[in-house]
Image (cartoon, rainbow, N blue to C red):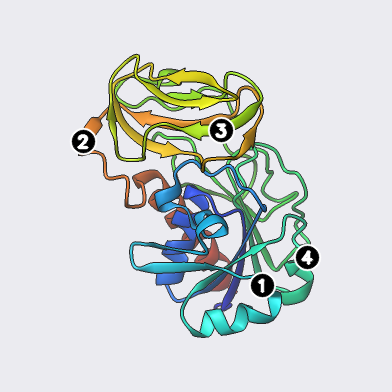
Amino acid sequence: MLPSLILIRGAGDLASGVAHRLWNSGFQIIMLELDNPLVVRRTVSFASAVFDQQIEVEGVTAVLCPSIDLVNSLLVERNIPVLIDPEAHALTDFKPQIVIDAIMAKTNRFTTIQDAELVIGLGPGFVAGSDVHAVIETKRGHTLGRAIYSGSAIADTGEPGLIDGYGRERLLRAPRDGCFKPLRMIGDLVSVGDQVAEVGGESIKAAVSGLVRGMLYPGLEVKAGTKVGDIDPRGKEVDFLNISDKARAIGGGVLEAILNRYNRS
């Protein structure tokens, strides 16, 4: 029998794509986040509930849950609870059968294969068969979304994937430590050289023309080099309100790993 409860560490855009697919497949989801997550693609990230109390993504609603005592009531109301729980105390409180590490830290910080009956890690940093049961490939290409049951995902190169031939140019990064202030909104069209944000009063300008697809929440304190936004060079054809093809593919890989484990047992 398939388990009903899944705990997902992280609630960014990729984690949210996974949660959305699993929720619509009939699973109950609890998501864990930081108190001030550096979520860039806010319109498709359940982490936005931390700031806005709740967010709906393609018909699925996530709600900030101030107490573990309210988790079950939110699930009954057909909402995904988002708990501020960076230490994952909910593992002990709920004892989920499935745990998914979707933090996307490029390294395994604290997840172990003993955390649940089935432990899944997204992207590089995990070894299937050692610290998790399965790893899902997150790098764009022919293997995106592949479920790996022995070994690791493709190592992180430090280079963002290309979109219309642009990689690093499409990312917005903090030029210094300081308070982040967006000057454009997600969905705005910008041109090369436009000032789109600032950190500590220092300007961040667009290095590529396109559509602002992501931007941190205003007022967050960031370190120099932190990703604070991104611009999609495909422009107005970009659907920034719906889950990306990448997130959907990764969600499909997670679903495969779950069915592989429980439909064969």
Q: Where does label 2 land, which residue?
A: 236
Quarter of the figure that contains the C terminus = bottom right
- Which amino acid type is marked by label 1? Gln
Q: Nearer the viewer, mark 4 or mark 3?
A: 3
- Which amino acid type is marked by label 4? His
Q: Nearer the viewer, mark 1 or mark 3?
A: 3
Q: List the single residue furthest toward the front.
A: 201
Image location (x, y in percent) of residue 234: 25, 30
Q: Are marks 4 and 3 in contact (CB under 8 Å)?
A: no
Measure how far apart labels 4 and 3 are at the Cα level: 30 Å
Quarter of the figure that contains the N terminus = bottom right
Tag 1 secondary structure: loop
- Residue at the spot 66% in from the left edge and 72% down from the top edge: 97
Image location (x, y in percent) of residue 202: 54, 18
- Which amino acid type is marked by label 3? Phe
- Residue at the spot 64% in from the left edge and 65% down from the top edge: 83
Q: Where does label 3 land, which residue?
A: 180
Measure how far apart labels 1 and 3 are at the Cα level: 39 Å
Image location (x, y in percent) of residue 232: 33, 30
Q: Where does label 1 land, which residue?
A: 97
Q: List the single residue furthest toward the left.
A: 237
